[in-house]
Image: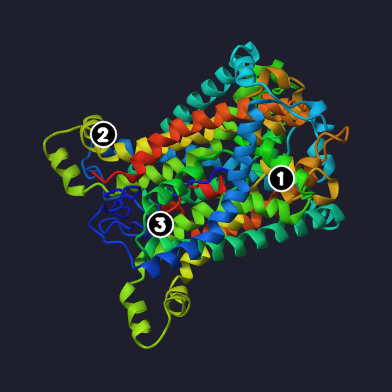
Amino acid sequence: MSLALRRRPPVRRAAVPLSSRSDRRLALLLLVPATATVLLALGYPLVRQLGMSFQRFGLEQQFGRPPEFVGLANYQAMLTDPTFWAVLGRSVGFCLLVAAITMAVGTAGALLLTACSRPVAVAVQVVMLLAWAMPVLSSLQVFQWMFDSRSGVVDHALAALGFDQMLGFNWFAQPSTFFAVAGLLVTWMSVPLVVFMVYAAVTQIDTSVLEAAALDGAGPAQTFRHVVAPSIAPVLALVTLLQIIWDLRVFTQFHVLQSNGGITEQTNVLGTFIYQVGLAGGDYGSASAAAMLLLLLTLLIAARYIALLLKEPA
Amino acid sequence: MTTVTTPPTPPATGAATGVSAPGLRTAPPALGRRRPGRRGLAVVANAVAVVFGLAWLFPVYWMLNTAFLTDRQIQQRVPVLFPVGGTGSHFAQVLGSPAFWSAMRMSLAIALVVVLGAMVFGFFASLALSRFRFRGRTQLIVAVLVVQMIPAEALFISQYRMLDGWGLLNSVAGMSLLYLGASIPFTIWMLKGFVDGVPVELEEAAMLDGCSRMGAFLRITFPLLGSGLVASSIFAFLASWNEYTLALVALTSDDARTLPLWLTSFSGQNQVTDWGAIMAGSTLMAVPVVILFMTVQKRMASGLTAGAVK
């Protein structure tokens, strides 16, 4: 059984009787500190934000003017604003594309590990672990430096390969190359996890099945399609959903990279858009509405993930 | 900070696979390699794997390389590929900077509060969910999972307003509260898996010997959770150590920066970016993370779906 699936059996229903009354009271007491902290740190802001999303809450309100209830006006304004749709489209497009590339590269990498010799496989896994462990900010700085227009190694490597016009090229000055670098960075950071998860799933496949397939004359392509792929499908589904959730909320990379180019408007994704409208622009009402939409979108995708997670392993 | 975990399962060392380097899986004696036609395939696979590995290694190497180069070497037109004739001066520069140490203190203080709080509160809650059956338990478990999915970006507007209203911006307390909210759910989820693994009979025996229920939890169960507590602590530590988004929002003053904020404060202000110092700083930030990562990597791959540190 693959590792992502070897989890505890799902919550049993009805079969287990309730604990005694005094035990239930102890259970409640034990839950209080954690629940109270989470409610304070996340629950209360969530309620307040929901309230703010129905209010006109701008700069005036910050200076003491009482917020005015405007119903769904913020949502309506957001949903009829072409800027918001452009941001949403960019976010979703980036997220799906990067998640797809990450899954393809990660799965290919994992299969590669099963096909190459042992020392190479161990070395690649050590590299994957290193890349995975790199803090986001460290990776971000390295990528900015690699793609630096003055003495970045990428421009020079491309020039050395004959693309002379790439010398001094500013990757962060136009949206297409900005997204390319951001996508490359996010992919670089995400692939190691996919490699480990998929590789773990592949190594759990019963070797006798693979041998039987080989005896029956299956080539590598057929073996993959009919034996390997079905066995690792549940893991692939879980990891894909996770990647989509993570890539949809990407913020740090964009926020930091935007400081290079001055093309913030054209490169905003949902996270940076909310930040700009709310914290930089002071329009808390609109930003709250956009944030609630992001939350809704995330939870819709997450519901699928949690359902998979709680499902009895097949 | 969205954190996502799957419950910790014992590391899946498949019986057929054999383990070579500590904790690293190796391939099954796979896919009929002995067949003569496959030799060529193996050579190609090795070559592609080496290229793949080098591509993922390069940014890490480039960070280290640049950190050890002199400023003149860094600003040369043609990149210097090896730190020959390099210097440790960038590290000295960072380690001698008060801003670095101020950020280090801030990061460590917050991480300490978060780790302690998450462990204590998480341990209590995981006991309740693991040992008792009460109405709403299933819903609570689902809630623990759902809460982990909430992106920081979806709440930071009102989290900022909340801390602002309480005068807790730029404070360890305020930052720790936000990080605790994000860390407690995955700590509960992880620790619950470990508590499930401790036989109830041990607690019952202690209670027969006169221990109270809570006494049995603290004296019997708690010490048996050693590795689980270490692993969850490391996750909570890494989550707070690496976090950028909420820190950016809630730590607006220069004196209250954490390390991730400090690292971005280099760029932008100066005309010529000091890449040597930035790479040295990036390295210093990465080293403790890599070490901790190595110590829990088995559990990383088996239990946690990287959420905590992403």
Mark linked to residue A94: none
Q: In this figure, which residue is indicated by the disc labeled 1?
A: B247
Q: From the viewer's perspective, is the residue at label 2 or at label 3 nearer?
A: 3
Tell me whether circle 1 and circle 2 mark residues in contact (CB < 8 Å): no
Q: In this figure, which residue is indicated by the disc labeled 2?
A: A224
Quarter of image, res B247: top right
Depicted B245 relative to depicted A265: above or below: below
Residue B112 visible, this orientation: yes
Given the image, on which type of amino acid does mark 3 rest? Pro
Return the x and y of residue A67 as percentages of the image width and height: 74, 28
Whether labels 1 and 2 belong to a single chain: the reply is no
Q: In this view, does A314 lie to the left or right of B270?
A: left
Return the x and y of residue B100 as percentages of the image width and height: 81, 54
Q: Farthest residue in the bottom direction?
A: B209
Return the x and y of residue B114 as percentages of the image width and height: 63, 59
- Residue pictured at 34% horizontal, 85% vertical: B208
Subunit that carries the residue with mark 3 = B
Of A256 and A121, which appears nearest the observer?
Answer: A256
Given the image, on which type of amino acid does mark 2 rest? Phe
- Residue pictured at 66% horizontal, 58% vertical: B111
Quarter of image, res A283: top right
Please, what secondary structure does the residue beneath circle 2 have? helix
- Number of numbered discs: 3
Cα gap from disc 1 to disc 2, whole angstroms: 45 Å
Please, what secondary structure does the residue beneath circle 1 have? helix
Depicted A215 relative to depicted A87: above or below: below
The mark that comes first in sequence, 3 or 1, is 3
Please, what secondary structure does the residue beneath circle 3 have? loop
Q: In this figure, which residue is indicated by the disc labeled 3?
A: B8
Return the x and y of residue A21 as percentages of the image width and height: 37, 67
